Image: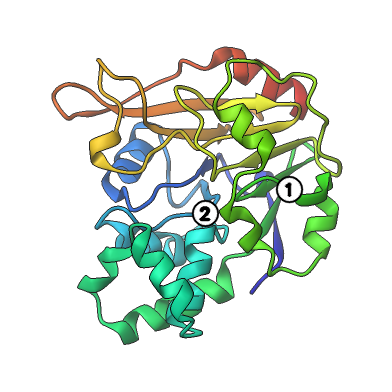
Amino acid sequence: MKNSMQITSRDFRNVFIVTDVHGNYEVLMEGLKLAGHSVKKDALISLGDCIDRNNGSFNTLCHFLFAANTFSLRGNHEDAAVKGFCDFDRENYHLIIANGGTWTFNHDETALENIFKLVDEKFPVAIELVHNGKIIGLTHAGIPGGDFRELTKSNPDRVAQYSAMTQFEKALSQSDETFAERDFIKGASLCVHGHTIMPLSPRLAGNQLYLDTACQSADYLIDSIEPSAFLTILKFNEAGHAELLRIFRDDYSKIQIDTPFGHIEEQINALIQ
């Protein structure tokens, strides 16, 4: 298991960050197209949990393993799959099946073992994104100990800690408070996480941005009546600024994009400039 890797935004035109796609391959691809993503010119980073709950899991995983300029963290779903299919850990195998992993029944077990071996080799626990001379810390979930630098140095087998929400994350996901006074994570100007679903909008608490807005299933995707679940894309553009893009389905099942989070963008840009 890789502990961490470093990516520099100036090596690319734009950097796109998504999280908890959970096999929604069509939504991911269409959303990136609408957002102007170029495989040749731009970087794409997933914060983990590419798989489970949708039959597009295999294609989504392959995209983050093999597409050019494309990277992914190791989320708790990938972690359980590696242990279940590569280490033959029956507890983790049953855990992944019980949490949306029935898509694996459609694939050969040897092929799954081989692809999850690649996940084990390629997907780190943390990514250090260097942007505008600032460090942006990327992790699947919250950072134990409150210091991004310590996470990148520590034993990489800490992903299991991500399987349970912290009390803070639970409160954040269930409250309308801004949490502006939240203690800042050390070692990074901004930290970006997935894992914990934030209803209606990504949330910024201190210098921690929670990006998972429940892109779990086609049945849960946002429509014009029930704005409850969608894919959020965080884009660091070639001008150096951050943008938040919402990818959703309208009443006619057409995938669309809008930018309703300008107030959060302003706060993010204040942290990274």
Q: CA distance from mark 2 to mark 1?
A: 14 Å
Q: Residue at x 50, y 37 (%)?
A: 212
Q: Earlier in the sequence, mark 2 or mark 1?
A: 2
Amino acid on which the number 2 mark rests in the picture:
Gly
Where residue 96 appears, x then y in whole percent? 40, 65
Q: Secondary structure at mark 2?
A: loop
Q: Residue at x 31, y 47 (%)?
A: 24
Q: Residue at x 71, y 20 (%)?
A: 179
Q: Secondary structure at mark 1?
A: loop
> Does residue 199 sit above or below 48 in this rendering?
above
The reply, left or right, for residue 17 in relation to residue 272 is left
Q: Residue at x 49, y 23 (%)?
A: 201
Badge number at residue 143: 1
- Badge 1 crowding class, 10 Å Cα cut-off, few under 14, some 14 to 19, many 20 or more, is many
Badge number at residue 48: 2
- Badge 2 crowding class, 10 Å Cα cut-off, few under 14, some 14 to 19, many 20 or more, is many
Which quadrant of the structure image shows residue 175?
top right
Badge number at residue 1: none
> Does residue 77 sit above or below 257 in this rendering?
below
Where residue 13 appears, x then y in whole percent? 56, 41
